[in-house]
Amino acid sequence: MIQQKELNTLSAGDKVNHFVLLNKLEIKTARNNKPYLNIVVSDKSASVSGKMWDGFDDFILNAKEGNVIKILGVIEDYLGQVQLKIEKIRLAIESDNVVPGDFLPKSNRDLNEMTEELETRMRKIQNPFLKKLLRSIFTEERFEKYIRVPAGKSWHHAYMHGLLEHTLEIIRICDLMCDIHEDLNRDLLITGAILHDLGKTEELSYEPSFDYTDKGRLLGHIVIAANEIENESKKIKDFPADLKMQLLHLVLSHQGKLEQASPVEPKTVEAIALYHADELSAKTNAYKSAIKAEERSGNRWTKYINLINTSLYIPGRESNQTFPKEDLFDN
């Protein structure tokens, strides 16, 4: 890949002559009723919105989301956020020697190290039925997807190998809970942790960019995982019905609340443990990412995040920041 500064290192006034991944493409209308190009682009470090006011007619005829593009322009400051003012734009060509995967963020952890950690932990499962189930589910093809896909499109662990990293965090938390509460069914809980987001191997795509598949949009990762467990357990002779039911409950309830897309709420101690382990891993990662995204701002608070209904404090900074209103009683 061509050497260029990462987007998260650029500030207002910096020139841009970059290859980037096109994440969003739309034509909007300005106040003067003139159309303009509005895009969101990214590299491994950050995503940035950009606007081009004219000269983009040929580009939009062939461009689509997921393309690698070349842009020439300048970074501007718009309401405290960096934005691209684009002067020239084109699709990447073969001789540029760049592919979409060059621009996808990935886990900071070593992939081989994480893979070995997962395989080692799976070998420690004692229950013969759960051990057989894991072997049956993780074909070579599925395991390859499992260790590569992100855990989400944008909110948490939204990078290559993100699902694997997220799962390992949950396993560690669940193992700790089993050390504290020795009456928890460790094999059941750890198997549930490993399989809770299995459906994301079919729900999410990372080629050419992170997005939801048709299957993911229509079924969702919880249903996909539950179906897989149901189908594979049937192939194992004398698989205990109660064990399967409890494992399915872990998967179906791991998002905790009906309004958070869980078909059922946790009703076993193991399910409660898995739900909170999942929450802890996901939210800690998401909050850290939100703070990291504000590194260039100099602010002591992030912008207001609708998904969590608050801004986040960034310690160790001095700022004259103007804070966004958080509720109707702010004046």
Image (tube, rainbow, N blue to C red):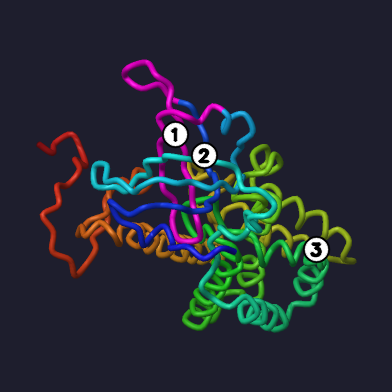
Q: Which amino acid does label 1 sit on?
A: Asn
Q: What residue type is labelled 2?
A: Lys
Q: Which residue is drawn at 39% across and 19% down?
A: 34
Name which quarter of the figure residue 166 lies in.
bottom right
Asked if the residue under mark 1 is in contact with the one under mark 2, i.e. CB atoms within 8 Å, the reply is yes
Query: In screen coordinates, is 120 left or right of 9?
Result: right
- Quarter of the picture holding the C terminus: top left
* Residues packed near mark 1 inside 10 Å, few (<14), some (14 to 19) or many (20 plus): some
Residue 54 highlighted magenta (yes or no): yes
Asked if the residue under mark 3 is in contact with the one under mark 2, i.e. CB atoms within 8 Å, the reply is no
Q: Which of marks 2 and 3 is nearer the N terminus?
A: 2
Judged from this view, the residue extending furthest toward the top is: 33
Give me the disc on residue 38: 1
Give me the disc on residue 24: 2
Magenta part of the chain: 28-57
Q: Where is residue 311 in the image (x, y as percent from the top left)?
A: 26, 51
Give me the disc on residue 141: 3
Q: Which amino acid does label 3 sit on?
A: Glu
- Nearer the camera: disc 1 or disc 3: 1
